[in-house]
Image: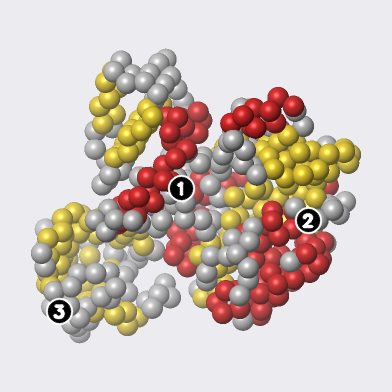
Amino acid sequence: MSEKIIPVIMAGGKGTRLWPLSRSSAPKQFMSLLGKNTLFQRTLARVADTERYEAPIVLTNAEFRFLVAEQARQIDQPLSKILLEPVARNTAPALAAAALIVAGEFGERAIMQVLASDHEIVEDDVYRDCVARAAEAAQAGRLVTFGITPTEPATGYGYIEAGEELGGGACAVKRFIEKPDRERAEQLVAAGGYLWNSGMFMLPVGIFLQELRQLAPEVLEAATQAIAGAKADLDFVRLEEEAFSKAPDISIDYAIFEKTPIAAVVPSPIEWSDLGSWDSVWKLGEQDGSGNVADGRTTLLDTHNSLVLSKDIHVAVQGMSDIAVIASEDAVYIGRMEDSQNVGKLVKHLASMRETAPLTETHRTSYRPWGGYTSVLNGDRFQVKRLFVKPGRRLSLQKHHHRSEHWIVVRGTAEVTVGEKVIPLRENESVYIPQGELHRLANPGKILLELIEVQTGSYLGEDDIIRIEDEFGRD
């Protein structure tokens, strides 16, 4: 058994509440909102103390696996495992699978701390004290959740009513309360003794598995079979799809915490936000003398208590108050701050229409393990992209059935394989890739390689890629 805590980080969510910056293929945990590092990277930093923590296990899906690996590499944070969920089944099956792995490697007496990858938390002495108290309660045989001390009558969170004190700063859980309306939230906060449900946990692994066996046996059975059939894939562990898909789609709250008699809550007066809306980003940001939070290329005049973010174009706002203006590469959101909790409704509306659905799914810039690309221009039978390849990386050896490509180097040095030839290219040099020809692009240099790619053909979809060799394990 390890004396250290084993962190389990949930990083598979595809929320779009921070649209247009967050999309289903680029959710908020992998975004840098008001700082250099992403929310996922900041979560990793909170478990980087090797005296307290083992290397973390990350729960995610196949679509995000390279984002997870790359962002951990960027901050030099080793990972124990990246566990890939083949289908979305909520938190209970995923945490059951993680607990089985922890029990197998560290023993059933091990303690695992479950963290969300998309929360903003100030890691100070108060936070560290709450973690220590939660670990102590878990070692005493309790399934522990962190209850955030309310700072307002928020309606976006569930609430926990704390019961009798258990010693060491933990309390028994009296009951869970669904997200309330405003009037009910005001009553709960005024009454005292109610905490926001943070979705973070400290779990003694053996006891957690025991409760799963008694209260959610179908969840544990599916996770057990998915682990038994799991396959290693480079740095990833793929859970067996057929077995995992049989698990109920249920959260750990409903499956275990609302039923178990051994649930405990640690009241946590920490600086915390799940960053579930643009007004929560505004509250956490550094406000100027007019109460504005601005980032990127922005100009504000006679504007107050507003959030203005731009990732590309220059945004100028004049004579406005209490609004959010968020500009991505291809879409702009403008709304009253008080309505920012309802962005999800707007996203569903956009997703329901063919012409706007892509705006909810992907950005103009997409990231890959080798670098990525930005869509510059789309037309009838042609499109233009900017490719960027990291030093020392290369794309798969591939071919296309329906398109040909022209590559022009604008920065760095490229090594291009076309059929049997390997062609070096420098800035302002180009190469033509005929339709159906085997080819590969590599960056042998020490700086980022940037190219302009012009595709022409009858079909230009990303699924027209036949990979012959791929060092990243993609089909």
Above/below status of 336 relative to 203: above
Q: Secondary structure at mark 1?
A: helix
Upstream in sequence: badge 2 or badge 1: 1
Point 72% across, 45% down: residue: 176
Point 45% across, 29% down: residue: 338
Q: Which residue is mark 1?
A: 28
Mark identifier at residue 259: 2
Upstream in sequence: badge 2 or badge 3: 2
Q: Nearer the viewer, residue 289 or 36?
A: 289
Above/below status of 423 relative to 287: below
Using the numbered discs, state the Cα–Cα distance from disc 2 to disc 1 in whole angstroms. 31 Å
Q: Which three-letter amino acid code belongs to the residue tagged 1?
A: Lys
Point 29% across, 18% down: residue: 319
Q: Secondary structure at mark 3?
A: loop
Mark identifier at residue 435: 3
Please indicate, yes or no, whether residue 296 appears anywhere in the rendered image: no
Left or right of 458? Residue 267 is right
Left or right of 239? Residue 149 is right
